[in-house]
Amino acid sequence: QVQLVESGGGLVQAGGSLRLSCAASGTIFSRNNMGWYRQAAGKQRELVADITSGGRINYADSVKGRFTISRDNAKNTVYLQMNSLKPEDTAVYYCNAKRPLVYGYDYWGQGTQVTVSS
């Protein structure tokens, strides 16, 4: 059973930083494409950043230059370093694991709240 556990969320002032972590278990982590998504109140869930098993990275335009995704396959963990946070970054952040070419391999963590005050 694949499990993803996020941590690192919290309350921060605008301009501050947070680092989110997502620890995976029950999976061969290095084979996964990993992503961070977020869902603000009343809005749809959206991709923030993802990183493939091969290390290719993609960011949403709204976070480019401020957020950095990385992974440590030895620790089965993916990170999201968030700098220069804005109130509009306030959301629940979710970790996601997908496996290329494996239909239905799509797992989510429980989410961690990030609140940015102005």
Image (tube, rainbow, N blue to C red):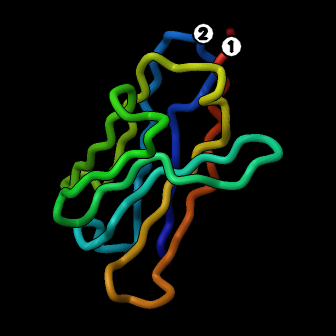
Q: Horizontally, is 20 left or right of 46 in the view? A: left
Q: Horizontally, is 40 left or right of 61 in the view? A: right
Q: Is label 1 in contact with label 2 (beta carbons under 8 Å)? A: yes
Q: Secondary structure under badge 1?
A: strand
Q: Which residue is drawn at 50% across and 87% down?
A: 104
The residue type indicated by label 2 comes to Gln
Q: Residue at x 43, y 27 (%)?
A: 82
Q: Horizontally, is 93 left or right of 69 in the view? A: right
In whole angstroms, how far apart are the C-alphas of marks 1 and 2?
A: 5 Å
In the foreground, 58 or 70: 58
Residue that lies at the very extreme toward the right in this rendered image: 42
In the rendered image, the vertical position of residue 4 relative to residue 106, given as above or below:
above
Q: How many labels does the image show?
A: 2
Percent coordinates x, y for residue 25 in the rendering: 40, 65
| Quarter placement of the C terminus | top right
The residue type indicated by label 1 comes to Ser
Percent coordinates x, y for residue 109 in the rendering: 57, 58
Q: Give neighbour class at mark 2: few <14, some 14-19, many 20+ (Cα, 10 Å).
A: some
Percent coordinates x, y for residue 70 in the rendering: 27, 44
In the foreground, 81 or 10: 81
Q: Horizontally, is 41 left or right of 29 in the view? A: right
Q: Give neighbour class at mark 1: few <14, some 14-19, many 20+ (Cα, 10 Å).
A: some
In the rendered image, the vertical position of residue 10 relative to residue 96, given as above or below:
above
In the rendered image, the vertical position of residue 50 relative to residue 91, given as above or below:
below
Which residue position holds label 1?
117
Q: Residue at x 42, y 56 (%)?
A: 35
Residue that lies at the very extreme toward the front in this rendered image: 61
Which residue position holds label 2?
13
In the rendered image, the vertical position of residue 114 relative to residue 41, given as above or below:
above
